[in-house]
Amino acid sequence: MSTYPVHRWFVALAGAVLLSWQSVAGARSLPDFTELVEEASPAVVNISTRQNVDPRAAGMPGMQPGMPDMEGLPPIFREFFERGMPQGQQPPQRQAQSLGSGFIISRDGYVLTNNHVVADADEIFVRLTDRRELSAKLIGADPRSDLALLKIDAGEDLPVVRMGRSADLKAGEWVVAIGSPFGFDHSVTAGIVSAKGRSLPNESYVPFIQTDVAINPGNSGGPLFNLDGEVVGINSQIFTRSGGFMGLSFSIPVDVAMDVVEQLKRDGTVRRGWLGVVIQEVNKDLAESFGLPKPAGALIAQVMPGGPGDEGGLKVGDVILSFNGEEIVMSSDLPHAVGRVRPGETATVTVMRDKKRVKLEMKIGALPDEDQAGMPGGQAPSTSAASDNRLGVVVRDLTVEQKQNLDVQDGVVVSEVRRGPGAMVGLRPGDVITNLDNQSVDSVAAFQQLVEDLPTDRSISMRVVRQGRASYITFRLGQ
């Protein structure tokens, strides 16, 4: 009798047992969120707002049939129509409403949510788990971090969340969100931390937590919990092309949020540190050009005259490698680090300059309002002599007016781009070249000499100012 069938049967049985054991072990390893949700949900609230909108001014529906736009009428006709209206009657008002989430952070009624949930609201209402709806006072808001602090009067024994530390989060860790997506109160979704320290467009001062937790409209402002039931983030944004959840959700770290809360409580506003520099990412070619062993740091493309960085000794072409002992790996790490420093405090900055490490100490300034933080731009036509060169571009010396408008001390302006390396890297007429191969350019003659001496065996950097904004580009010259 052959033993082969028996062997096959034994192997199949062993495999089935192993798969069954793995399934049971895997099921047992999945977290149970029931206790967390029972404990945390009472402190999560629903937030709604009202904004009174004049339909005549906004051109919205709701106006009485045949009622003209009074503001657009000549006075004689406006008086005629107003006489025809019943005494004391006012044009109807339309109320715009928004819906979001929040959570109670203190027993005396402080509530944290997103700024965009309550922005421009005339009235704010907070609905508790016991279905009470209370009017809320806006203590302060910070658009840069998208946070707002509210206060409700509901006694002294409100349920509150427990705060954790977002710095302790790790990628792959389980997290839970509770909120009101599409108005469904206390909806619970779970997922994992996908990444930390994410920078989003126009959100330079928040190192977002990225998760795959299902977040939808109405979740904004709600808490993100770790498995210990502690708040580690505030759900703020989703990345979507459809308007719904797509697996990319972003939360504000609670460490950042609580710093904002303390400032809003104390001052009603938030002050952040500021260096007064324009930075860009260091790629492989730029790293080679500046003598870095690997792409890392924040390359300074522009220094605002009279700003903290300028007074502290920072220069165009410096690569910031660390700030207050914190390594700057990506350029986006720098705004996060600087923003945490209180204006007026001294910080230590390590830079790579002329292929050498230099340590500087400087006093940090206060981040100005957005409408005051722009760099000057614009330029006037140049009339000085032009010269062609090895890069295939025609350049001219800058006029005094151009230097003042562009806020540059030296450089040459590109007046024509011909076939060659300049065209290949995207140079345009009107661009101002201030540095080439880590050397300052102060005239056409100096630029020509630098071009003639350019090497052919490595990446070469060039600093270009375009419409008032500076950046570095790299290129290689053929043999």
Image (tube, rainbow, N blue to C red):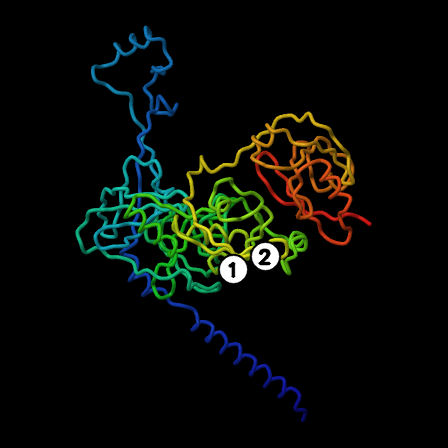
Q: Classify mark 1: residues with Cα within 10 Å, few (<14), some (14-19) or many (20+).
A: some
Amino acid on which the number 1 mark rests in the picture? Glu
Compared to residue 266, the image places residue 121 above or below, namely above
Count of numbered badges drawn on the protein: 2
Residue 410 position within the rendered picture, expressed as x and y whole percent measured from the top left: 63, 37
Q: From the viewer's perspective, is 338 left or right of 432?
A: left
Image mark for residue 263: none
Q: Position of residue 331 (x, y in %)?
A: 54, 52
Residue placed most toward the observer, 304 or 477: 304
Circle 2 residues within 10 Å: few <14, some 14–19, many ≥20: many
Residue with the mark numbered 2: 296
Residue located farthest toward the top when viewing the structure as drawn: 76
Q: Residue at x 25, y 52 (%)?
A: 129
Q: 195 or 96, which lies in front?
A: 195
Q: Is residue 456 visible?
A: yes
> Measuring 40% from the left and 60% from the top, which residue is drawn there?
166
Q: Are marks 1 and 2 in contact (CB under 8 Å)?
A: yes
Quadrant, the N terminus: bottom right
Residue 391, by quadrant, is top right
Q: Residue furthest bottom?
A: 1
Alpha carbons under labels 1 and 2: distance apart: 9 Å
Q: Secondary structure at mark 2?
A: loop
Q: Position of residue 400 (x, y in %)?
A: 61, 29
The kind of residue on which mark 2 rests is Ala
Instruction: From the viewer's side, name the closer residue of 41 and 341.
Output: 341
Q: Is residue 214 left or right of residue 158?
A: right
Question: To which residue does mark 1 refer?
Answer: 327
SS for callout 1: strand
Q: Is residue 274 left or right of residue 457?
A: left
State the residue lying farthest toward the right: 479
Can the viewer see residue 247?
Answer: no
Q: Is residue 249 above or below residue 53?
A: below
